[in-house]
């Protein structure tokens, strides 16, 4: 019992530490108040938001009956509405100082550690367990570790600095030629049951069974080199490859290339690549990082070029590929079979660096878009402490990402 309590405590503090370490990439306090993405709050919000989440969920679940700092929490509880990409938030907030938010985070850390040490613990840890709320806060911060890193990657270079702990992969070169390989179909079962072996969000519970036919999947993730001809062929200017929403999005954003590509006439490809804290020569053999609208447009363009029916996989097809290539869950890994969970680099790696039975990066490197919109499985229930986590996205317009 005490061993599990200490394991959770380590996981909480490790997560808290690495999240704060990420923000050490921001060179000065001024950088915290920049808005690198106009559709999101400045970084100071996200620095305090994950700690605020802990407090809010502890209060809602009646595990804590007070507030740590009501002023900070009132500003950092709710982010920009993410239901639509054009939902601008122009509210003029009087943000607290970086020092104030750092002190707030320290108080929340002490609170959570105290609760881990003193709350009753029994097994299994299920939805009714007070420790479920602790796990929810940890996994929520893990989500924001990724989303905050994306925002930091969009800060002007004058506001960021390198950290030795956040190492970029130095293996860069030409991309391997991609090809389509066979994947066996079969009956795919998705979903979790109560209790499950690890934490899961509410949309992961329930059951869904479906039959998947044999199909072909690309051997590698789409690389920067493979995506470049789409741009050179005017892919961002040609509406025929894009969905109606895609056309609206690219006009609204005035986008001509992926967000982390930097136009540079002096570069051989015409672009440089923005990593976490620096610009580098375009790593042609790294995977391209795009949103669903861009990924779908690329598939439509490539289908036309190759006279083949090429699309994104469904969620069930992705699991079919995963089951064929990786027969262990993450709890059984002695070493991650891909560039995932910061076990290797704070950047992508070449698309052929981690091979699994003929395929590269079945898990790891980047999130992988699917054609499946998020929805509840049979038996889906909303977690009472976080009733607005997944249901607002059950609208057919929010596609699932897999892979990690």
Image (cartoon, rainbow, N blue to C red):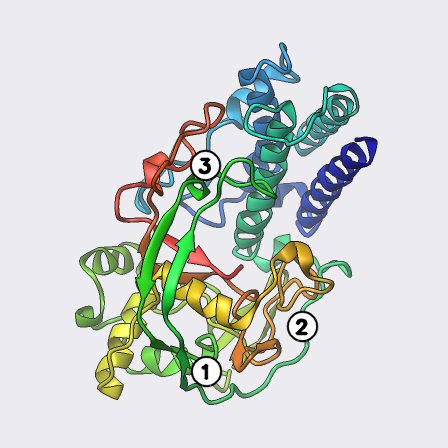
Is there CB contact under 8 Å for labels 2 and 1? Answer: no
- Distance CA(mark 2)–CA(mark 1): 17 Å
Crowding around mark 2 (Cα neighbors within 10 Å: few <14, some 14 to 19, many 20+) is: some
* Residue 165 rendering spot, x and y as whole percentages: 76, 58
Residue indicated by mark 2 = 169
Which numbered disc, 3 or 1, marks the residue that appears first in the sequence? 3
Q: Residue at x 27, y 49 (%)?
A: 397
- Distance CA(mark 3)–CA(mark 1): 38 Å
Tell me: residue 249, above or below residue 83: below
Quadrant (top left, top right, bottom left, bottom right) of the N terminus: top right
Determine which quarter of the picture holds residue 183.
Answer: bottom left
Crowding around mark 1 (Cα neighbors within 10 Å: few <14, some 14 to 19, many 20+) is: many
Tell me: residue 327, above or below residue 158: below
Tell me: residue 26, above or below residue 206: below
Residue indicated by mark 3 = 202
* Label 1 element class: helix
Between 378 and 85, the one lying in front of the other is 378
Q: Is residue 296 visible?
A: yes
Residue 145: assigned label: none
Between 105 and 216, the one lying in front of the other is 216
């Amino acid at each position: 019992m005490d061993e599990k309590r200490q394991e959770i405590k380590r996981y909480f503090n490790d997560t808290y530490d690495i999240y704060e370490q990420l923000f050490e990439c921001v060179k000065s306090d001024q950088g915290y108040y920049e808005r690198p993405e106009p559709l999101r709050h400045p970084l100071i919000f996200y620095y305090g938001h994950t700690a605020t989440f802990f407090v809010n969920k502890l209060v809602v679940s009646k595990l804590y009956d007070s507030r740590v700092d009501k002023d900070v929490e009132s500003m950092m509880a709710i982010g920009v509405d993410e239901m639509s990409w054009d939902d601008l938030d122009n509210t003029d907030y009087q943000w607290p100082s970086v020092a104030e938010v750092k002190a707030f985070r320290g108080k929340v850390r002490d609170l959570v550690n105290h609760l881990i040490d003193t709350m009753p613990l029994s097994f299994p840890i299920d939805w009714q367990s007070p420790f479920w709320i602790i796990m929810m806060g940890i996994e929520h911060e893990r989500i924001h570790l990724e989303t905050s890193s994306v925002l930091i990657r969009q800060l002007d270079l004058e506001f960021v600095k390198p950290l030795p702990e956040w190492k970029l992969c130095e293996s860069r070169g030409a991309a391997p030629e991609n090809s389509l390989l066979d994947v066996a179909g079969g009956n795919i079962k998705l979903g979790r049951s109560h209790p499950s072996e690890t934490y899961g969000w509410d949309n992961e519970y329930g059951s869904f069974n479906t039959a998947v036919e044999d199909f072909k999947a690309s051997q590698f993730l789409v690389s920067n080199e493979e995506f470049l001809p789409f741009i050179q062929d005017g892919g961002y200017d040609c509406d025929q490859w894009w969905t109606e929403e895609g056309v609206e999005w690219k006009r609204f954003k005035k986008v001509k290339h992926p967000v982390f590509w930097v136009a540079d006439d002096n570069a051989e490809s015409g672009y440089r690549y923005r990593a976490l804290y620096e610009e580098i020569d375009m790593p042609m053999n790294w995977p391209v990082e795009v949103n669903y609208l861009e990924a779908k447009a690329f598939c439509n363009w490539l289908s036309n070029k190759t006279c083949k029916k090429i699309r994104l996989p469904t969620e069930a097809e992705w699991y079919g590929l995963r089951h064929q290539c990786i027969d262990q869950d993450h709890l059984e890994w002695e070493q991650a079979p891909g560039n995932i969970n910061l076990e290797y680099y704070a950047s992508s790696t070449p698309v052929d660096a981690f091979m699994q039975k003929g395929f590269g990066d079945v898990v790891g490197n980047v999130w992988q878009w699917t054609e499946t919109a998020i929805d509840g499985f049979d038996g889906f229930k909303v977690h009472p402490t976080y009733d607005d986590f997944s249901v607002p996205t059950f609208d057919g317009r929010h596609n699932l990402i897999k892979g990690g």
